[in-house]
Image: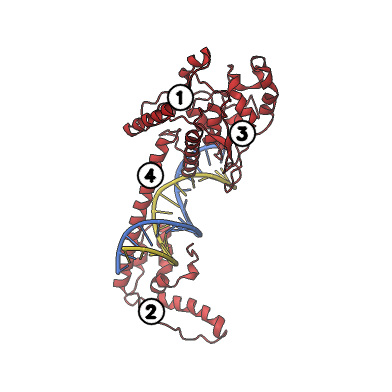
Chain colours: A red, B yellow, C blue
Amino acid sequence: MMSSDPQDSATWNDECQGSQDELDTEKKNGSLESMHGDLDDDDDDGFNRLDEDDDDEDDEEEGDDQKPKRRGPKKKKMTKARMQRFKMRRQKANARERNRMHGLNDALESLRKVVPCYSKTQKLSKIETLRLAKNYIWALSEILRSGKSPDLMSFVQALCKGLSQPTTNLVAGCLQLNPRTFLPEQTQEIPSHMQPASASFAAHTYSFQTPGLPSPPYGTMDSSHIFHVKPHSYGSALEPFFETALPLTDCTSPSFDGPLSPPLSVNGNFSFKHEPSSEFEKNYAFTMHYQAAAGLAGPQGHAPLYPSSAPRCEIPMENIMSYEGHTHHERVMSAQLNAIFHDS
DNA sequence: TAGGCCATCTGGTCCT
DNA sequence: AGGACCAGATGGCCTA
């Protein structure tokens, strides 16, 4: 792309390198003032240093001892006025860059508010926000593509793909996951056909590997960090998870325990088109903010997690934290999503 | 203390 | 010429 090697460029250096020492000092001090203070009336010294550096390059061509005269246009002297102009230009450029980065951060903050995990006090890092957003978009796309209702576990799994463990915890907290619900210790409550998978679920480390991502912590997720263990059983919801090999490593490790403090929220309010097939499902309709489904190993490592036959994870309504703070925009977005899913 | 994250400065490149 | 964008460097802050 662009050359980042300072040695490659001579344009700005030719004009200003002479004051590089002062600039370095300014950099350390966080102010350009130090640079200006060292200027003499006749400030050629800096450029003399530059000439020496440039001559070093020429030495490769024309010998060791002889310092050939520099070719090309003669450098302008760094007068006080020029230095002043440089200083002003640099300050303006710095200010623009600051504003640009602030704009970027504002946009990132906006993004934080629309991904399904938002907390003013426990902000996602930039990179995690982008990763979560990517996963979220993918998950929503998958819903649109398949037209199928998701199960919560699969959804969370997809959301957390490639995220660090702290972020994974945060997402789980936002979604009010209560994973102990699904642990093998309740095997007596889990249908027999689930049990072997349950053992596997508990025996392995759940590991995401996303191409292009750094290895741990970003590339792995130990489910034990996500799940708060609590007696409960929605065994059927585990099935797609087991099938896609989501293991829990440690059922007893301390982990998320209810809502994070301060409370986190799930954005939007979103009901899937889903005809309850049982009284249980009627009682525990899956209603979440912007809720979506996802898969695990599609084109970019995701695969469908919720085949049409897959049991759905039904979350008790009381476990879904309401979100009072979402904006009008988010409510509109939520309504639109609802419309999409109720029409599909 | 090491590592992660961040803000800022800086110079290079491209574009208008 | 100047602005936008980018990536490298640096130092501060925080946390495990």
Mark 3 surroundings within 10 Å by alpha-carbon count, few (fewer than 14), some (14 through 19), many (20 or more): many
Q: Position of residue A68 (x, y in %)?
A: 49, 86
Q: Secondary structure at mark 4?
A: helix
> Quick one: label 3 or label 2, which is nearer the N terminus?
2
Q: Using the image, determine if residue A193 lies above or below residue A221.
A: above
Mark 4 surroundings within 10 Å by alpha-carbon count, few (fewer than 14), some (14 through 19), many (20 or more): few
Using the image, name the chain to which the residue with label 2 belongs.
A
Quickly name the residue at label 3.
A222
Q: Is residue A49 left or right of residue A84?
A: right
- Who's the residue at 53% across and 34% down the image? A294
Q: Are marks 2 and 1 on the same chain?
A: yes
Q: Is residue A241 visible?
A: yes
Label 3, label 4: how many angstroms apart (C-alpha)?
30 Å
Label 2, label 1: how many angstroms apart (C-alpha)?
72 Å
Q: Amino acid at mark 2?
A: Lys
Q: Is residue A342 left or right of residue A79?
A: right
Label 4, label 1: how many angstroms apart (C-alpha)?
32 Å
Which circle, 4 or 2, is nearer the viewer? 4
